[in-house]
Amino acid sequence: MPSFNKTRSTSDDPAPSPRRIPSVERLVGGASPADLAAYGRIAFTGAIRAVLAGLRAEAGPVPEAAAIRAAACRQLAAERRPSLKPVFNLTGTVLHTNLGRALLPRSAAEAVAAVMVQASNLEFDLATGARGERDDHVEALICRLTGAEAAVVVNNNAAAVLLVLNALAMRKEVVVSRGELVEIGGSFRVPDVMVRAGCRLREVGTTNRTHLRDYAEAIGPRTGLVMKVHPSNYAIAGFTAEADPEALYALCRERGVPLADDLGSGNLADLAAYGLPPEPTVRAALERADVVTFSGDKLLGAVQCGIVAGRTDLIARVRKNPLKRALRVDKMTYAALEAVLRLYLHPERLAEELPTLRLLTRDRAAITAQAERLAPAVAERLAGRAAVSVSECVSQIGSGALPVETLPSAALVLTPEAAGEPARRGAGGRCKRLAERLRDLPVPVIGRIQDDAILLDLRTLEDEAGLLDSLASLVSPPSAL
Ligand SMILES: *Cc1c(COP(=O)(O)O)cnc(C)c1O
């Protein structure tokens, strides 16, 4: 009994009569050939059905057929937008784990593209025609740059640590200082990784002080490995002591136990030579350890991967371990890593060619000049939303490299304006809302909020025109809602 006109009220409309909603067939049949070709008939029909389902669930008038088709096209266009996409990282953290860490040089991106669309000699020895070894593409380069005898590459440094522990110390004890039982973030905790690798953790010393004699007492017949871990994201200050690295290495050799050093951020260049805070290189670490593990996408500036480098016999055990197969990397990774490692062969040009080093070595004067130059154009695009000024700030390296060091930098400071915003929204709320708008841009702009303003640290801004373009989409006036 269709008698809904009796109880009809403005706020409580029943669903419109299904008869007034056009059929799927009619809507698809009348669609423009261009839309059908662009999305395909199957996807287009699915989107039409979804829009109609929405209309049936809602009260109110049924739109024209053209409007229903347009809604379907908008939905299809939105679905086509990639989920993973470029953003402007203006947070001031150069190696930002959540924003993809190191940026690759073009040469590396091109090397990746080349092996992606064509077959490659990934595991094929072109000289003999026999099967090859995928690590061969980078092993000699790694050895040349670090002094290691051999090297293997796996998925990331967490994988490298897991593999080293499992290959060298399964069912054995691993001696680690209590001051180095680190949590790196993303649930990578040294004690947990030990358990997963099938090792028993043998803690020595105390949080702030560990001595050579602590290691000497702990090393015994059950020891498989002594491990050092770089305190990547903290510093222990005050009354502290750590065993002398040379003496510890001598002790390990005397007892016949390998020493592994998890460096975290693998640094291949002498950073001090580029005016950066000094950080021990992989080469220096290998003078006092048998194997080292480090990331490919931290200071090294390449792709996500983990590198194990060191003594031939130990690396052979690592390579033979069945986990290596589970943790191995794709040809894209080798292509990018090889291209980046080659840049290190020309240290004079490195700070120019390697994006990570180029960004880290920018000085405050240059960044301030860039900020002053850009401020008027940015202010124009933010008119009515925020006032724009220039301020000094500090950037960080990020990803656990030199955690307590900062780099002098400069930022554009966006101070949201109250105009057009309800008074109940305080400065903090306005700031959050502006940050949301910036994240919603075609190329999202990610800054950091500080004292009710958004700081855009320009240390990491190279594509100025791209930033201004993206900000230009903020054209619509700020809404009061
Ligand atoms: C970053 C880090 C790791 C983990 O490296 P990923 O490449 O992120 O897996 C492990 N150990 C240390 C000391 C680190 O700094």
Image (cartoon, rainbow, N blue to C red):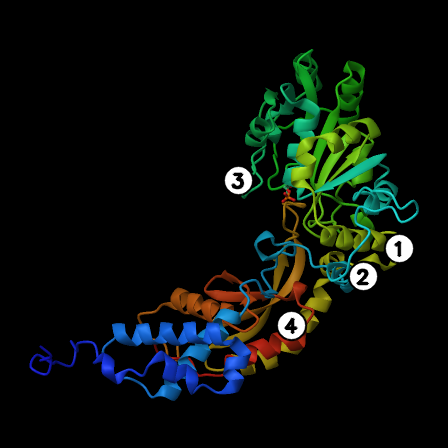
113 over 383 or under it: above or below: above
Label 2 CB less than 8 angstroms from ligand 1: no
Q: Nearer the viewer, residue 49 or 352?
A: 49
The amino acid beneath tag 1 is His
**Badge number at residue 303:** none
Residue underneath mark 1: 346
Secondary element under disc 1, as helix, strand or loop, is: loop
**Residue picked out by circle 4:** 371
Q: CA distance from mark 2 to mark 1?
A: 10 Å
Which part of the image, by quadrant, shows the N terminus?
Answer: bottom left
Q: Which is in the foreground here, disc 4 or disc 3? A: 3
Q: Amino acid at mark 3?
A: Ser
Residue 208 falls in which quadrant of the image?
top right
Marked residue nearer the N-terminal end (1 or 3): 3
**Cα gap from disc 3 to disc 2, whole angstroms:** 33 Å
Return the x and y of residue 428 as percentages of the image width and height: 40, 64
Mark 4–mark 1 distance (CA, rounded to whole Å): 31 Å
How many angstroms separate mark 2 from mark 4 (CA)? Answer: 23 Å
Residue at 79% across, 62% down: 107
- Mark 3, Cα crowd under 10 Å, few <14 / some 14-19 / many 20+, is few
